[in-house]
């Protein structure tokens, strides 16, 4: 008889996010890739970064990629390359991570918020016409949780107003809208490779992708002290380069991205199937023509905070993305928005809850999460 008792699966913690199984699978390849960079002794702006830029651009269906230090820097540099300056206004959704807004603020420009659609949490395109002003200089569409925003009307609006369109793809690499991957709809698109993202580095990293040769060249200068040639700077830039070790790691992980995406979608399908039997909980919506990549599997429940506590007591992790829409952040108090200005975003902020989601999540774990939710709604 074994001296090691089987783990008590019913009490095994289920974290909301876990990278350890992934590292167990790919660790040897990662270490080989890192060793390759160490042996080359080339750490910044080398072959790995260039190869990654080409691979990510191809994945997004565009011509160019510019590796930068983070998703936030990708947004700041893309906005700047598109001509946004102090005093300008930039339209963006209020339901997003604060970085989308603070990138605008970092340039001295003013974010102008739009409400979301209640079923997708992405920006409602019908808001844009109401919020645009003569000072509007650009527009950011965020693909929240891994689901593409409704790009047809957003692109049409940007074209009709001749506004540069920037996509914030930080949460949605690989997601599709009418058969095309996000990243190819805007003038520029920004990716984050923060470790928890669907394609995550082992530190901070990001990229801007674009079809424009001109934006590509400008971004290449801006991330490197505004240098158009070595030691010849044509405008103020700064240092925001994606390093070779992160690029080499990301190239290993990129080979697995399609499989991981399939696993996330299969996990979401299992959640959806089981949650059908559970009243009072709204699973995520995948509109026709979109392929969601489930960076987050986000449900909606009126008694959200109590549900989160109930799950925590059963050692099940969950996270609220995000408890405050941007217009209610202290950071933007000076802009004069009030509670009630964006009712869909505000209600979502009180009701959304992201459940455990990662490619290696097992079906028995999903069953345990849904059982715990079903117990909660009964009482
Ligand atoms: C929607 C969104 N935009 C921008 C960012 C910023 O990316 P980073 O953390 O790489 O700076 C994030 C990352 O969390 C994000 O989720």
Image (cartoon, rainbow, N blue to C red):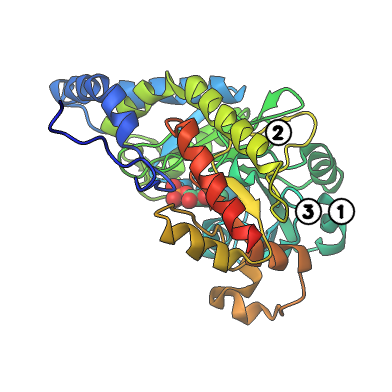
Which residue position is annotated with label 3? 117
Q: CA distance from mark 2 to mark 1?
A: 18 Å
Label 3 crowd (10 A; few <14 / some 14-19 / many >=20): some
254 in relation to 342, above or below: above
Residue 124: % across, % down:
80, 53
- Tell whether 12 sits left or right of 188: left
Contact (Cβ within 8 Å) of mark 2 with mark 1:
no
Mark closer to the observer (2, 3) = 3
Residue 157: % across, % down:
84, 46
Secondary structure beneath label 2? loop
Label 2 crowd (10 A; few <14 / some 14-19 / many >=20): many
Question: In front here: 150 or 317?
Answer: 317
Q: CA distance from mark 2 to mark 3?
A: 20 Å
Mark closer to the observer (2, 1) = 1
The answer to whether residue 80 is seen in the rendering is: no
Instruction: Give me the residue at 20% from left, 24% from top.
Output: 31
Secondary structure beneath label 3? loop
Question: In front here: 1 or 121?
Answer: 1
Residue 107: % across, % down:
54, 61
Answer with mark 3 or mark 1, whichever residue precedes in sequence. Answer: 3
Determine whether the beta carbon of the residue marked 3 sits less than 8 angstroms from the nearest atom of ligand 1.
Answer: no
Quarter holding the C terminus? bottom right
Labelled disc at residue 126: 1
Residue 309: % across, % down:
49, 65
Label 1 crowd (10 A; few <14 / some 14-19 / many >=20): some
Contact (Cβ within 8 Å) of mark 3 with mark 1:
no
Question: In front here: 239 or 56?
Answer: 56
30 in relation to 134, above or below: above
Labelled disc at residue 185: 2
Instruction: Give me the residue at 58% from left, 22% from top.
Output: 63
Answer with mark 2 or mark 1, whichever residue precedes in sequence. Answer: 1
């Amino acid at each position: 008889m074994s001296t090691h008792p089987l783990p008590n699966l019913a009490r095994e913690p289920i974290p909301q996010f876990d990278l350890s199984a992934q590292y167990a699978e790919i660790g040897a390849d990662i270490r080989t890739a890192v060793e390759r960079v160490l042996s080359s002794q080339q750490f910044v702006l080398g072959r790995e970064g260039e190869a990654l830029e080409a691979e990510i651009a191809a994945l997004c269906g565009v011509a160019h990629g510019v590796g930068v230090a983070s998703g936030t820097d990708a947004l700041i540099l893309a906005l700047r390359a598109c001509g946004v300056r102090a005093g300008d206004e930039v339209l963006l959704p209020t339901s997003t991570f604060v970085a989308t807004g603070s990138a605008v603020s970092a340039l001295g420009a003013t974010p102008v918020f739009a409400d979301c659609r209640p079923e997708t949490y992405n920006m409602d395109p019908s808001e844009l016409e109401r919020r645009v002003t003569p000072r509007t200089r650009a527009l950011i569409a965020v693909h929240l949780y891994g689901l593409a925003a409704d790009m047809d009307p957003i692109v049409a609006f940007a074209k009709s107003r001749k506004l540069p369109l920037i996509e914030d793809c930080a949460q949605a690499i690989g997601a599709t809208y009418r058969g095309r991957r996000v990243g190819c709809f805007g003038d520029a698109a920004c990716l984050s490779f923060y470790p928890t993202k669907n394609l995550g580095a082992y530190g901070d990293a990001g990229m801007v992708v674009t079809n424009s040769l001109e934006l590509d060249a400008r971004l290449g200068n801006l991330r490197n002290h505004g240098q158009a040639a070595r030691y010849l700077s044509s405008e103020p830039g700064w240092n925001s380069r994606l390093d070779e070790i992160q690029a080499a790691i990301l190239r290993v992980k990129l080979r697995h991205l399609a499989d991981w995406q399939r696993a996330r979608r299969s996990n979401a399908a299992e959640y959806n199937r089981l949650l059908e039997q559970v009243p009072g909980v709204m699973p995520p919506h995948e509109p026709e023509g979109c392929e969601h990549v489930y960076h987050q599997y986000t449900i909606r429940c009126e008694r959200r905070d109590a549900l989160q506590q109930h799950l925590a007591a059963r050692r099940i992790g969950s996270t609220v993305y995000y408890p405050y829409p941007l217009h209610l952040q202290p950071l933007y108090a000076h802009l004069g928005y009030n509670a009630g200005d964006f009712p869909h975003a505000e209600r979502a902020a009180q009701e959304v809850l992201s459940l455990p989601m990662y490619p290696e999540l097992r079906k028995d774990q999903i069953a345990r999460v849904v059982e715990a939710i079903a117990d909660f709604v009964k009482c």
